[in-house]
Image (tube, rainbow, N blue to C red):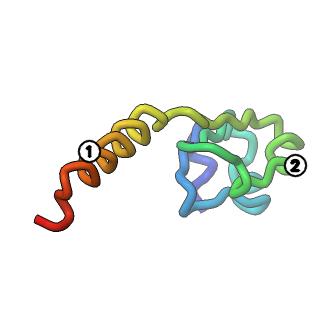
Amino acid sequence: EIADQYKAIVLRSANSIRKKTIKNSKGHLKVIGRAGSGVDNIDLDAAKDAGIRVVNSPSGNSIAVAEHTFALILALSRNILKA
């Protein structure tokens, strides 16, 4: 593994950080960032034991979700799907 070459790792929901990766970081890794809500794909116990801070961004895409919702409402109201 190459985890010992980084001080920070940012991941999305398709990836995971498990105990093996945290051990392979050999103390170099300082923070694991999760783009999105939830940290279920990160081994929190192993990170805590290694002194690694785990952060996430639960409201990072809330504006994009609101914009998409509004666009869908407009599309339905204007019958764009039938066109």
Residue at the spot x=42%, y=37% of the render?
66
Q: Quadrant of the C terminus?
A: bottom left
> Which residue is more in the foreground, 63 or 53?
63
- Identify residue for label 2: 45
Q: Position of residue 29 (x, y in %)?
A: 67, 40
Q: Secondary structure beneath disc 2?
A: helix
- Mark 1 vs mark 2, foreground winner is 1
Marked residue nearer the N-terminal end (1 or 2): 2
The image quarter containing residue 16 is bottom right
Q: Is residue 23 left or right of residue 29?
A: right
Query: Quarter of the image holding residue 7?
Result: top right
Residue count near mark 1 (Cα–Cα under 10 Å), binned few <14, some 14–19, many ≥20:
few
**Left or right position of 10 against 42:** left
Mark 1, residue position:
74
Whether residue 19 is visible: yes
40 is higher (above) or lower (below) than 36: below
- In the drawing, does residue 53 fall left or right of residue 36? right
Q: CA distance from mark 1 to mark 2?
A: 45 Å
Looking at the image, residue 45 lies above or below residue 63: below
Q: Amino acid at mark 1?
A: Leu
**Which quadrant holds the N terminus?**
bottom right
